[in-house]
Amino acid sequence: MTRQCARPGCSEVARATLAYDYKQRTTWLDPLSDESHPMAYDLCHDHAQAMTVPRGWRLEDRRYPLVDGSLSRW
């Protein structure tokens, strides 16, 4: 079953999963998870690309591996 973007009014297919940790003030964008999780949000490509976080938070974009095998960071 295809999952849709969690953003209100968006009917695009989800391509990434957003998760966060308040204590660490960190947000992660990962490849779409195999299953939905109540503590994560599925986003379409456009909404994942436009993702911003509050001042003082860190956003780690772990969707795209680099050539050396490490992961890119937003």
Image (cartoon, grey):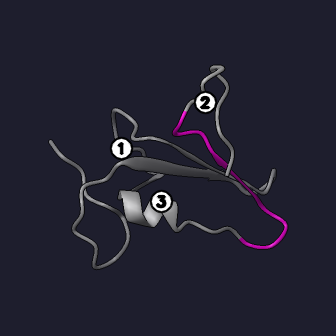
Give the label, 1 or 3, closer to the camera.
Answer: 3
Residue to which mark 1 is pinned: 36
N-terminal-most mark, 1 or 2: 1
Nearer mark to the viewer, of 2 and 3: 2
Q: Position of residue 2 (x, y in %)?
A: 18, 46
Report the Cα–Cα distance between label 1 and label 2. 26 Å
Q: CA distance from mark 2 to mark 3?
A: 18 Å
Give the x, y percent position of residue 47: 43, 66
Residue 38: where, in percent of width, then height?
43, 50
- What numbered label is drawn on residue 66? 2
Mark 2, other Cα within 10 Å: few <14 / some 14–19 / many ≥20? few
Residue type, label 2: Leu
Residue type at tag 1: Ser
Q: Residues within 10 Å of mark 1 (few under 14, many from 20)?
A: few
Q: Position of residue 13 (x, y in %)?
A: 24, 55
Task: From the viewer's side, name the closer residue of 74 and 33.
Answer: 74
- Circles 2 and 3, Cβ within 8 Å, touching? The answer is no
Ranked by sequence position, the earlier of labels 2 and 3 is 3
| Residue 71 is a magenta residue | no
**Quadrant (top left, top right, bottom left, bottom right) of the N terminus:** top left
Residue designated by label 3: 48
Prevalent SS, magenta region: loop
| Residue sitting at x 45%, y 48% | 17
9 relative to 12, above or below: below
Residue situated furthest left in the rendering: 1
Q: Residue at x 52, y 39 (%)?
A: 63
The structure residue drawn at horizontal position 40% and vertical position 64%, both measured from the top left corner, is 46
| Rendered position, 56 above or below 34 | below
Q: Is residue 39 visible?
A: no
Report whether residue 18 is seen. Answer: yes
Corner quadrant of residue 59:
bottom right
Q: Which residue range is magenta in the image? A: 54-64
